[in-house]
Amino acid sequence: MTITATTGAGIALSHLSKSYGALRAVRGLDLAIAPGETVALLGPNGAGKTTTIEILLGLIRPDRGTVSIFGKEPAAAVRAGWVGAMLQTGSPLDHLRVRELVTLMASYYRRPLPVADVLQMTGAAEFAGQWTTKLSGGQAQRVRFAAALVGDPDLLLLDEPTAALDVEGRRDFWQAVRAVTERGKTVLFATHYLEEADAYADRIVLLAGGQVVADGPATKIKAQAVLRTIRTTLPDADVVVLSSLPVCAAPSGMAMRSCCRAQTPIPPCERCSTAIPAPGTSRCAEAAWRRPSWT
């Protein structure tokens, strides 16, 4: 029998910590992923998603804790060809056409997938003869995906994989990922889109401040992460008087929300001190995750 990664243990991160000077990117993170599972790392920018993926790839070493990928250390798992990755940073090699680049990547693996099939699956076939220096942002993202897939890895690590893709590109991308997972592969992807994690992950791990704050199926995470609306009925309220209250009645640094035609002051985000804007406008990332919505 051929021994592959999936015949061993899954992925395990234990008491993982990583700091950059005073910044603690990952703090005591514990995570276990079973072979064949699709898991989303969900959280705002700075939550520790990218650092966790870079540790899994062996690109950086943790300050504390242990990492195991199918029973091996990250570097050993990568050398064995068990891991494919699509990162936010980096660009395709210059002076190569797309097909040549993917063919080069395939040559590094023992049992790669057919290059033509991978180009077709990732939507890169239509510009396979184009120079890598002439690619648009979305095309470059498809090439990165093809390079990650062509080695037929047992674990696929995707860091914000749909960045720079349009709506059609995102749909095609996730269809390709589904084809990968149907073959029993393990997928871990980082995103800050709750709807994306909900649609494509078996399980969501919610990160904040470098720690796991929630872990479970999408229904559980949505119940904790989605903003709640609280409505209040004042039986004896004088609507005329309430509606006449000035909009600027809140203290400095307080955002205003409409409540029974009155303007109700809402305190700023307790983590970043940014006032939460009125409904319909953009919120600070921490506020969107941490504070309730009032109407």
Image (cartoon, helix red, strand yellow):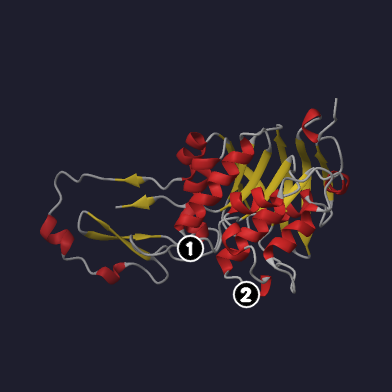
Q: Which residue is mark 2?
A: 134
Task: Answer with left or right where residue 130 lies relative to residue 108.
Answer: left
237 vs 270, left or right, is left
Quadrant, the N terminus: top right
Distance from the alpha carbon under mark 2 to that under mark 1: 35 Å
| Residue at the (76%, 37%) spot, across then down | 11
Residue drawn at point x = 54 percent, y = 47 percent: 174
Give whichever of 182, 77 is nearer the camera: 182
Residue 196 percent location from the top left of the image: 50, 47
Horizontal and vertical percent position of residue 190: 62, 51
The residue mark sitting in front, 2 or 1, is 2
> Answer yes or no: do the residues labelled 2 and 1 have beta carbons within 8 Å?
no
Q: Nearer the viewer, residue 182 or 293?
A: 182
Pick the residue in front: 202 or 120: 120
Q: Earlier in the sequence, mark 2 or mark 1?
A: 2
| Circle 1: element type | loop
Judge the density around disc 2: few (<14), some (14-19), many (≥20) Cα neighbours within 10 Å: few
Instruction: Examine the rendered structure and indicate whether residue 16 appears above or below residue 133.
Output: above
Residue 31 position, x and y percent, is 71, 39
Q: Residue at x 78, y 65 (%)?
A: 21
Q: Name the disc covering residue 284, or none.
A: 1
Task: Point out which mark residue 4 bears.
Answer: none
